[in-house]
Amino acid sequence: MAVKLSGNACVGQSGGPTAVINQSLVGVIEAARRHKKQIKSLLGAVHGTKGIMAEEFIDLFCIPQTRLEKIAVTPAAALGSVRHKPKDDECAAMLAVFKKRDVRFFFYIGGDDSARAAQTIACMAAKSHYDLCIIHVPKTIDNNLMESDHTPGFGSAARYVANAVRGDELDNRSLPGVKVNVIMGRDAGWLTAASMLARRKDGDGPHLIYLPEMPFLPEKFLEDVKGVYARHKRCLACVSEGIRDADEKLWAETAGKRLYDGLKDDSKNLLGKPRKDVFGHYQLSGTGVLADFLTGLISNNTDISRVRGDTYGYPQRSFPGFASKVDAREARQVGRHAVKCAAKALGGSVAIRRRPGRAYKSYLALVALELVAGKNRKVPKEHICPGASDICPSFRDYALPLVTDLPETDTLD
Amino acid sequence: MAVKLSGNACVGQSGGPTAVINQSLVGVIEAARRHKKQIKSLLGAVHGTKGIMAEEFIDLFCIPQTRLEKIAVTPAAALGSVRHKPKDDECAAMLAVFKKRDVRFFFYIGGDDSARAAQTIACMAAKSHYDLCIIHVPKTIDNNLMESDHTPGFGSAARYVANAVRGDELDNRSLPGVKVNVIMGRDAGWLTAASMLARRKDGDGPHLIYLPEMPFLPEKFLEDVKGVYARHKRCLACVSEGIRDADEKLWAETAGKRLYDGLKDDSKNLLGKPRKDVFGHYQLSGTGVLADFLTGLISNNTDISRVRGDTYGYPQRSFPGFASKVDAREARQVGRHAVKCAAKALGGSVAIRRRPGRAYKSYLALVALELVAGKNRKVPKEHICPGASDICPSFRDYALPLVTDLPETDTLD
């Protein structure tokens, strides 16, 4: 597209919530208001693609700035989110709505699945020669978008995880035993790796960290735990919900299925049947089955009496008032940048890049949707220690600037 | 005891950590330093009663105030905690250590089990005519100590829970479905009741709240969930880990045993065998079994597709940097008060009381150990709504002053 577009705009939110997804929404609203010559109105799609199809919109230009500032610091999608993989006929239906309402700009805030939906609509618009500028605004606590140094939402989730694990480390010192924490991140271990930021000095937990990037071997895990316990008389392990076996099969799925299949027929109703979501993803969040499997493994194969497991769950992505300042600021900038690009009729996916040098500085780029859509960026091997049960100190340099300050704590020893 | 004592002092921490237990420790240290005429030295017992028996002590008078201030804001027991019910011979051994080291003051920071241990040692000292002033310094996120309006640790845990549930409410609005949160509190529902503070307006979750104080009937729970879901197209339920059936049997225990017993013999090793701790308490924390049982119940008996469960776990008691200001201040005062009482040779348990009137004000009292030891203070029935699936607005007046401010959030509807 070479010529500047003018017409209405639409913005939607998609996928799992984050602590700063509304910063990006507010960034889009603010910047769109500054481009009123081109952007006549801004429609907020209620529950993403679902709202577009149902023509359920909120007029976002009429919301006062004071209210927007409160929305910005509120976790979870203020417009409502959606987990839905739009089919071709649904994309066609959305395009028809856009045409009917003269929508020329579409901002879709989400992860790699949302980028794919955006790409599908973009292709369809191009085919029907309808000028529509689509910008994918990145968002995911998983930090797994290609072409980015990191993604909005990650820094805040990592801050929650680092702080919760710090608390768990203090708790575990206080009442020694084995503690296993299962941390979010289906396809990449970024968030679990951030648990290493909880360490303050030698001997501090987490003592063991396992990511989906390396095969998880239960026998080795058991030996690792025994080794740490022998050395420290306690052990704090952080495990990604996405850990896989050597065949790339999710352990959470294996554990859930084994448990379900291991039940006698008249006891099957004690557990919900293991199931997959609309994307064919096996349900990992909102169940304690992986942590219970791992603590059972330790309890059944050692004589350690105190073994506990926590599945960190939704507070990782939606705990209010604990966002990273850098993450909040960047999430806002990403939303504004999307509008600036759209005003120049540039479509694609916004990416955060990091400038080289000791002091942390970032800048924004716009990349082609197909480089991001449906793709997964893993934690590079150089951050993973040999033995695959720990994270290298290099990861601290990467992650700490994104997490910013953590509450100060001290110990008596 | 009428005469003032002089000699050495000992302080220990016991039971589950809290976010402010070290405020009380620092309160004891500060106040003891101001009574150096009577208190010659202050021994910090490492891991409570275990440290006393092993004579593992830290000299607490030598720690500079700047360091103490950092310790004070650090969650979990800085001296190390213990879950141990001392037997008579162990109490005798501790008394022997106290005699040997001329310990005349013993401050034990803990819950109702710790008060009982303190009482046993106090009785033994009295029998052997050894002048020993014992003060139980209250601490428990469970808020279940008799004679108190509330206990140090509760306000901060309630602040975490209210905020996490607020985030979950926003998350659940964003991606509608049924969400069940299991919240700590074995014998009393105070902390689970605090989830009601997450509500901002009509229709906000939590929509359902269940406490151990009322029998939990799975069939009724299912009907409650279906009713809320029919009305709001979503449902957020908060359930205490301590919910019981009509025979007072813990549902977590029943669920864990049913699941374990329901496994075929060759699959038993998939779960750790359900077990009890030293107090004969069935393990509730550190397992996701109750949440999985409740979500399974909903999944298997409704056609609701999105059903998730979280077990809030240890961050409730040990998340750094999120303590309630009132709770932190009172925890410190309680520690100081214990020393003031001891200096006057008054033994017992410190209790926080509330002054009547609209503005929140508290004061401290000293009560007999036997009024607190091993006892449990339940949530009064007047705070529980008819139907036993919600908490009355009166609870907000009780709990909000203890939790203090919560992060501001806003929604678009």
Image (spheres, coloured by chain):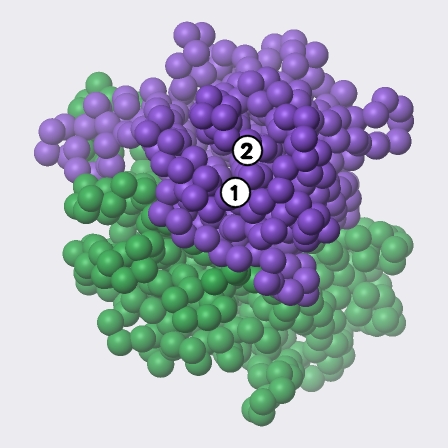
Chain colours: A purple, B green
Name the residue furthest left: A266
- Element under label 2? loop
Task: Give the answer, above or below, for where A237 lies relative to B389.
Answer: above
Left of B151 or right of it: where is A253? Answer: left
- Name the residue located 10 percent from the left edge and 34 percent from the top edge: A266
Q: Is residue B172 visible?
A: no
- Name the residue located 75 percent from the left edge and 31 percent from the top edge: A364
> Mark 2 belongs to which subunit?
A
Residue that badge 1 annotates: A103
Residue B372 image point, x, y percent:
49, 72
Residue that badge 2 annotates: A132
- Name the residue located 45 percent from the left edge and 16 percent from the top edge: A244
Residue B45 image point, x, y percent:
69, 51
Residue B46 image point, x, y percent:
68, 46
Q: Amino acid at mark 1?
A: Val
Q: Is residue B176 visible?
A: yes
Q: Are marks 1 and 2 on the same chain?
A: yes
Q: Residues within 10 Å of mark 2 (few under 14, many from 20)?
A: many
- Element under label 1? strand
